[in-house]
Amino acid sequence: MSNEMIYGIHAVKAVLASDPARFIEVYVLKGREDDRLLPVLKELAELGITTQEMGRKALDDKADGASHQGLIARVKQGRQYNENDLDLILDGKENPLLLVLDGVTDPHNLGACLRNADAAGACAIIVPKDRSAPLSAIARKVAVGAAEVVPLVRVTNLARTMRALQEKGVWFVGTAGEATHDIYQSKMTGPLAIVMGAEGDGMRRLTRETCDELISIPMGGSVSSLNVSVATGICLFEAVRQRRG
């Protein structure tokens, strides 16, 4: 199993909470002792996890220029999910909410979508194996811990996975500019998967054709589209609003 680097207090706390056995080594900025960091360092020490103090330049080099908040950890790779895990993820969930990202290749957007999905209570994000951003240190940092709790399921054939879930009663709502009605006219209360396409290109043809319904986000200004993570948040929380009712 390969190792990976995680940056920042949220990402380290999330691994501490979910699977502390993944830690190999932790690097901390020399002289940094503030109220946010000290409890994390105390918990690492109690678990017998080695922490090594480093100067700013050495830490920046290790993070390859990414923002790290004075804390970096080398960890064993987390659990990898594929289509065979979906039955277990959905088991016992009466009204699951899923997010599908078809062609989101920017790790910042993937991280932000993970954060949105966690906040909205989604039980998984489904992405195609190809044409999808890796769950990199950058994505994990942007996700502020959500990458450790929301399963990211990489599937070989997205349309086939969608059809298999449709047979289990999941309704697929895809976002598309050419949709004939908007998000606020859509019923989003049952077992639901929200499908977002890539920025610029949108969903691939087969993905779009496999959706049960197409919706758009009403746009009132001069810009023609939203960042995919912003659009994802809007769609997820409209579903949350309706499901609370």
Image (cartoon, rainbow, N blue to C red):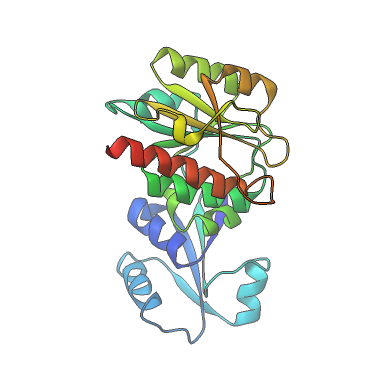
- Please identify the quadrant where the C terminus is shown: top left
Residue 80 horizontal/vertical position (percent): 50, 37
Residue 18 horizontal/vertical position (percent): 35, 51
- Name, please, the residue furthest toward the front: 220
Residue plotted at (52% across, 22% down) = 213
- Name, please, the residue furthest toward the right: 200
Residue plotted at (58% across, 19% down) = 159
Residue 123 horizontal/vertical position (percent): 38, 37
Residue plotted at (64% across, 43% down) = 133
Q: Which quadrant of the figure has residue 105?
A: top right
- Name, please, the residue furthest toward the top: 167
Along the line of sight, which residue is nearer the eye, 5 or 211?
211
Along the line of sight, which residue is nearer the eye, 239 or 126?
239
Query: Can residue 187 be seen?
Result: yes
167 horizontally vs 217: left or right: left
Query: Can residue 136 be seen?
Result: no
Residue 45 horizontal/vertical position (percent): 34, 71
Q: How many marks?
A: 0
Vertical relation: 7 (above or below) 235: below
Vertical relation: 166 (above or below) 58: above
- Please identify the quadrant where the N terminus is shown: top right
45 horizontally vs 110: left or right: left
- Name, please, the residue furthest toward the bottom: 31
Residue plotted at (40% across, 75% down) = 37
Vertical relation: 12 (above or below) 157: below
